[in-house]
Image (spheres, grey):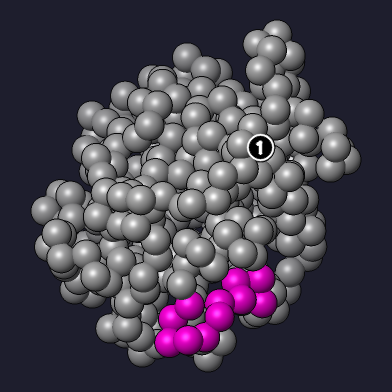
Amino acid sequence: MTHDEQLVWLRETDQQRLTRLWQWADEVRREHVGNDVHLRGLIEVSNYCRRLCGYCGLRRPNRQIQRYRMSADEVLACARRAVELGMGTVVLQAGEDPELDGPWVTDLVRRIKATTDLAITLSLGERSPRELEMWRDAGADRYLLRFETSNRQLFEQIHPPHAENAADRFALLHTLRELGYEIGSGVMIGLPGQRFTDVARDIELFRELDLDMIGVGPFVPHPQTPLGQNGLREDVGDEQVTNDATVTWIVIALARLMCPLANIPSTTAVATLHGMEGQLLALTRGANVIMPNLTPANYRKQYQIYPDKACCYDDSPAALTKLRERLAVLGRTVGVGRGDSLNKQRRGDSRTVRQSVDPLDVGRLGSTQAKTSEGR
């Protein structure tokens, strides 16, 4: 698909044509990654952050949230809960917290690997190559680092550099690939000053980077941030991309068509702005991943990247049973095992992975726990 063809789709409003796009993306998804919806257990480890990002409620100057940092034992308990629920992956996410340093995360990854067969995705911000190497050697499987927008000027407006050093997330993504991680990245849709040409270039970068996971979500600023209070002054008129559901779904669909083997989540931000139905509809338009939130409730409410963050699915058996029922209506099933990247398999990456075989079957938690105690 050419740049100009993508622009036509990004600006499309005709519902009949959009229905054809949804069907096309869904067919490509079914053909290349199947009907499984992979579940990633999200653990929000810390809401401390040293950065000054213009939209994120975790930014260092925000004194309106209660800061927390989970202990290693608390994180490990959440990982074990993921195993009990039949998940194959946990995502350890945090603000860019200096206390989550190389040795601390290394020890945590090793402990999770020693007691479970879970794949581990890290999403801990911009880190040094040395830290990334330590964590990979400890057993971390994947790393998520969004480049947010391919428009460098816009990126620098929303992400002031840390310690006067300009960020180069593309260089870090290449470092992650060289270290053998599955790499995930993605963008926000509807940033003030974001043009349709920017988003078309974003989608082209998904393919050029050969991403294993692609995250696409609408822009949602926190009110205690510059973008939440004042926005950006640049006015791009009719070229301004909106953060509505339709444009987000279009980008998800185009990402599937351009990167047919990638794992593409239906994000929490979609559910926050457009409800659970909006999140489920993304699964019919190219997405194949959902991330239930395993963060303890007393911490979860303080992880305020943006306000009123949706939690459609948590670690309760009732919530996951409900999810299975909704997926069945869509003709989809919960994926078994880790849900490793088919792109990685295609590339023939040298570092092999172990496969988990536990299904998500809440009615058989006792037998799943027994398998865990036996070391599987």
- Percent x, y for residue 172? 61, 76
Tell me the amino acid under the disc marked 1: Glu
**Mark 1, residue position:** 239
Task: Report the side of 192 relative to 76 (left or right).
Answer: right
Residue depicted at x 52% and y 86%: 165
In the image, 185 versus 306, the foreground residue is 306
Q: Please say whether residue 156 is visible from this viewpoint.
A: yes
Quarter of the image with the N terminus is: top right
Compared with 340, 241 (above or below) is above
- Percent x, y for residue 227? 38, 53
Residue depicted at x 62% and y 27%: 285
Q: Is residue 168 magenta?
A: yes
- Is disc 1 surrounded by few (<14), some (14 to 19) or many (20+) residues within 10 Å? some
* Quarter location, residue 48: bottom left
Furthest-top residue in view?
16
Task: Report the side of 274 relative to 298 (left or right).
Answer: right
Q: Is residue 173 magenta?
A: no
Compared with 303, 240 (above or below) is above
Quarter of the image with the C terminus is: bottom left
Furthest-right residue in view?
2
Q: Please say whether residue 354 is visible from this viewpoint.
A: no
In the image, 346 versus 191, the foreground residue is 191
Of helix, strand and loop, which mostly describes the magenta segment? Answer: loop
Residue depicted at x 47% and y 14%: 329
Compared with 253, 70 (above or below) is below
In the image, 90 versus 300, the foreground residue is 300
The magenta segment: 161-171
